[in-house]
Image (cartoon, rainbow, N blue to C red):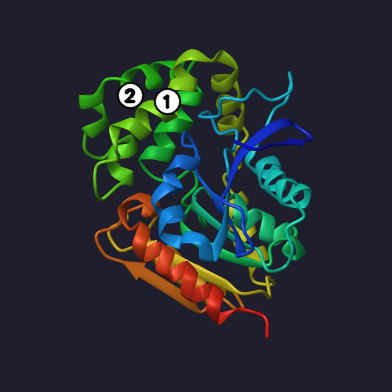
């Protein structure tokens, strides 16, 4: 897997290569790039898919000692990653679950040529209901994240309705993915510490502030949402599409919750493909 050096340390990423339109696929907390595996397959050779493993607790390559990350600094890190890869205005940034892309587009609109917001934190749903608030609470209890990771290692506990990964997927999240995502949190104190610091660095108002900034993001944008999402309210997708000056594009998918790349990878890939064609430069 390729690696690049950023200000915080080494970031791994997948790059399918080729001369297609670059599509940067950004995952959420306690996940890695494998959440996008079916979308990458569906997009095929028409696109150059770039999938960084962001340091959200499921990363395996340690950052530099002493590094601390907050949601705001993570948003800027996504921009730094794109700068390092010298991605141009034709690049498409797609984010699921987290809201860092909205913050980046509000603060550095020139860096985000085109944007797809796919079932993300937004407005006052921050930390997001259920799964997000559970993580935030665990981060404020000594040893809470380690305890949560140990609990999630017990497969039947993952299926408790209304909690964790169970609320994020319309279909059960595959056990092989959850096993992979929680392993660093079970075994690596530094990974746990980074996630704890990130969660404690959340500012309740920062997604509402980002939404205000998006009102001046005058570049192509698409919003994709799951109609059955119980963690990210579907009405937030409609509000985002309305406030973006060039974001009147909204796709709502059935049989789909927060983890759109797992629930409806083909539907998401089709939406991305159509969006890219409609917004291509002459």
Q: In which quarter of the image is the C terminus?
A: bottom right
Q: What element carries label 1?
A: helix
Q: Which residue is rendered at x = 75% and y = 47% of the image?
A: 80
Decide if residue 219 is on the left or right side of residue 7. left
Alpha-carbon span between mark 2 and mark 1: 8 Å
- How busy is the neighbourhood of tag 2: few (under 14 within 10 Å), some, or many (20 plus)? many
Q: What element carries label 2?
A: helix
Q: Which residue is rendered at x = 74% and y = 23% of the image?
A: 64
Q: Which residue is rendered at x = 29% and y = 32% of the image?
A: 175
**Residue 207 vertical placement versus 215 (above, below):** above
Residue 229 locus on image (x, y percent): 32, 55
Give the number of the disc on residue 98.
none
Residue 211 locus on image (x, y percent): 60, 62
- The residue at which mark 1 appears reads as 182
**Residue 19 vertical placement versus 205 (above, below):** below
| Chain-order first, disc 2 or disc 1 | 2
> Furthest-bottom residue in view?
282
Residue 10 locus on image (x, y percent): 70, 31
Asked if the residue under mark 1 is in contact with the one under mark 2, i.e. CB atoms within 8 Å, the reply is: yes
- The residue at which mark 2 appears reads as 152
Decide if residue 248 is on the left or right side of residue 147. right
Residue 28 locus on image (x, y percent): 49, 43
Q: Which of 108 and 135 is in front in this view?
A: 108
Question: Would you say residue 28 is visible in this rendering?
Answer: yes
Q: Quadrant of the N terminus?
A: top right
Question: Would you say residue 145 is visible in this rendering?
Answer: no
């Amino acid at each position: 897997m390729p690696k690049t050096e950023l200000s915080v340390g080494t970031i791994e990423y997948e790059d399918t290569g080729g001369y297609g339109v670059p599509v940067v696929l950004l995952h959420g907390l306690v996940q890695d790039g494998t959440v996008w595996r079916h979308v990458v397959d569906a997009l095929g050779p028409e696109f150059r898919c770039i999938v960084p493993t962001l340091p959200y607790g499921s990363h395996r390559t340690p950052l530099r000692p002493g590094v601390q990350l907050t949601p705001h600094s993570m948003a800027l890190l996504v921009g730094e990653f794109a700068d390092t890869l010298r991605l141009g205005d034709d690049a498409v940034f797609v984010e699921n679950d987290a809201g860092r892309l909205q913050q980046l587009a509000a603060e550095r609109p020139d860096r985000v040529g085109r944007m797809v917001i796919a079932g993300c934190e937004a407005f006052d749903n921050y930390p997001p209901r259920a799964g997000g608030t559970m993580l935030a609470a665990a981060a404020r209890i000594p040893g809470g994240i380690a305890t949560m990771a140990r609990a999630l290692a017990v497969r039947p506990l993952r299926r408790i309705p209304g909690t964790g990964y169970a609320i994020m997927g319309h279909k059960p999240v595959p056990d092989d993915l959850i096993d992979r995502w929680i392993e660093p949190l079970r075994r690596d104190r530094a990974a746990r510490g980074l996630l704890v610091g990130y969660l404690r660095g959340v500012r309740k108002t920062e997604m509402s502030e980002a939404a205000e900034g998006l009102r001046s993001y005058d570049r192509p944008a698409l919003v994709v949402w799951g109609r059955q999402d119980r963690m990210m309210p579907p009405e937030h997708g409609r509000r985002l599409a309305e406030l973006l000056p060039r974001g009147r594009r909204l796709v709502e998918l059935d049989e789909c919750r927060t983890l759109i790349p797992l629930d409806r990878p083909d539907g998401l890939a089709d939406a991305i493909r159509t969006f890219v064609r409609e917004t291509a430069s002459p």
